[in-house]
Amino acid sequence: MKTTNRIPCRLLGGFRYAIVALLVLAACSKDQLMEFGQAPQVYIYKQTDDASRDSATYSFAIQLPETVQDTFRIPIRISGVARDVDRTVHYEVLDRSTADADLYEILPARIPAGSYTGFLPIRLIKKEVLAQQEMRLWIKIVPSADFEPGAADQLEYLLKVNNYLTRPPSWVQGYFGDFSQVKYGMIIRETGYTDFTGTLPAVWYYIIQSCKNAMLEYKASTGQDMVDELGNNITFPF
């Protein structure tokens, strides 16, 4: 009688499970090798649809007059996996920057535990020179014990800092009165408007009333009228 060598079904099923298990283990090992083989990286987060993706301007002129310092935060992101501990990010000011050392302070940066994002915090200090001259800070991410720098085109950021504003072409004397940097800064701060081209009457009223309300709040809290950079009281025609 002719015999045929056959593998029992239960053994065949066992072989299949063993093969699948080996493949899974191989895949896990490969993932682990990829994870451990590539050092964690960090880079400046630059949205492609953001006009300020490579730079930003900070002006003390749009802040309250008593503001003497503020912190600007540059968003950063990591590639790799989140960890259960805080991790340190290092960054520096490049030599081509034009800012004096007493105009800024580099603060510690980190990626918080469990997070993929963080900030590069830079303390900005208001000095008289900023009323006449804009300073420029070129920031660059550098290696730290926790991170290597990421993509080369996402490691630098230009921060421009000043304490002045120039009169926009769309400024209307009949609505706003005489131009001043403090008045324009208050308009930006209270309403977000920087350009007034094609502005409807209802919007003019909203802008002026918002600023008047801010001036009343300022006087209530300080006991003084708000003045411009020349020491003149800020007023509107109506």
Image (tube, grey):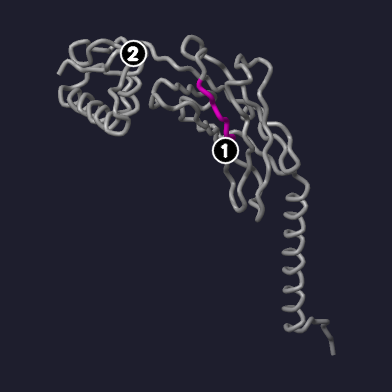
55 on left or right of 213: right
Q: Is residue 124 magenta?
A: yes
74 on left or right of 237: right
- The span picked out in magenta is 120-126
On screen, residue 91 above or below 35: above
Figure quadrant of the C terminus: top left
Amino acid marked by disc 1: Phe
Q: Residue at x 27, y 17 (%)?
A: 234
Figure quadrant of the N terminus: bottom right
On screen, residue 216 above or below 131: below
Amino acid marked by disc 2: Gly
Foreground pick, 54 / 192: 192
Q: Which of the 4 image quadrants contains residue 27?
A: bottom right
Disc 1 to disc 2, C-alpha distance: 37 Å
Residues at badges 1 and 2 in contact (C-beta under 8 Å)?
Answer: no
What kind of element bears circle 2? loop
x and y, in percent, of residue 182 in the image? 35, 18
